[in-house]
Image: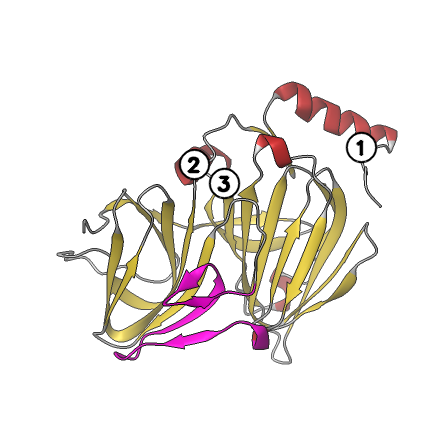
Amino acid sequence: MKSRQIKSVIESTSTMEGAGVRLHRGFANEKAHLFDPFLLFDDFRAAKAEDFIKGFPWHPHRGIETITYVLRGDVEHGDSLGNKGVIKGGDVQWMTAGSGIIHQEMPKGDTDGIMEGFQLWANLPKNDKMMGPRYRDITAEQIPLLKQDNGVEIKVICGQVDGVSGPVTDVVIQPEYLDVWVPPKAKFTHITDEQRTVFAYIYFGEGLFEDGAEEALGDKKLVLYEAGGKVDITAKEQGLRFLLISGKPLKEPIAWGGPIVMNTQEELQLAFEELKKETFIKHS
């Protein structure tokens, strides 16, 4: 079985979003075609409240799904469906914007003023872009932890590993989303569908991300893989923790305008016209 080789390594870059949230962006608009069916990946780890407390006040989405995974701290949220609550450390929120939703996400951090988490945007295929909005909150206790003989630990958020399935189901693009811990000098091998886009995002330690690699990669590096049947990743002395994410490409045109992603410029223009006319929300 062919092991996947590294296609590119991306250093996430500092940027500001929302009402003034400082974060590190792995990829977005200009590189989205490389990550099909994914559109954007943000790392919002911060040690100072001033870098996240202003949050992401009310804003619209259409045509996408957003996946928020919190490592540490709290995120208060609410939306136009009437949902509201708090995502805590270890929790996941998977929101399908579909035909249109207006929501807000307000990071609060933990008792030490620290906020850590990630947000991933997944595209919706043309036939599902105007589906009814929905969302699911998955608590940390609902996410299975798979322990392998060599000490590797895998939180299976979405997808299946060694017969263990993640709690996030019915996602249109059927992605796989894993949070992986590899002990010092141990090796992690994972079978991948050759048709899928696969990337890893490192957030602790260093490791070698392909067989025969000589350069170790560490925190805030994103690894995009070539096609292949598996990934082989070896941790260095400190151990290694990373997200491993994959999905089947849609191979459809992308028309992107801020928080709205459609297939054509005409669909995009219509969405913004509906926002002005207050006819954007199709499902209540």
Check residue 28 in the rendering and tell me which mark sits there, or answer none.
3
CB-based contact (under 8 Å), mark 3 and mark 2: yes
Residue 133 to residue 51: above or below: above
Please give the residue where the numbered disc 1 appears in the rendered image.
275
At which x and y percent is residue 230?
26, 54
- The quadrant holding residue 190 is bottom left
Between the residue at mark 1 and the residue at mark 3, the CA separation in whole angstroms equals 23 Å
CB-based contact (under 8 Å), mark 1 and mark 3: no
What segment carries the magenta color?
A: 141-167
Amino acid type of the residue tagged 3 in the rendering? Ala
Residue 128 to residue 235: above or below: above
Q: Earlier in the sequence, mark 1 or mark 3?
A: 3
Q: Residue furthest front?
A: 163
Q: Is residue 257 magenta?
A: no
Residue 14 to residue 208: above or below: above
Between the residue at mark 3 and the residue at mark 2, the CA separation in whole angstroms equals 6 Å
- The quadrant holding residue 216 is bottom left
At which x and y percent is residue 70?
57, 66
Please give the residue where the numbered disc 2 appears in the rendered image.
31
Amino acid type of the residue tagged 2 in the rendering? Lys
Q: Secondary structure at mark 1?
A: helix
Q: Nearer the viewer, residue 283 or 180?
A: 283
CB-based contact (under 8 Å), mark 1 and mark 2: no
Q: Secondary structure at mark 2?
A: helix
Q: Residue at x 61, y 41 (%)?
A: 64
Q: Earlier in the sequence, mark 1 or mark 2?
A: 2
Question: Dot 3: few (<14), some (14–19), or many (≥20) neighbours within 10 Å?
Answer: some
- The quadrant holding residue 219 is bottom left
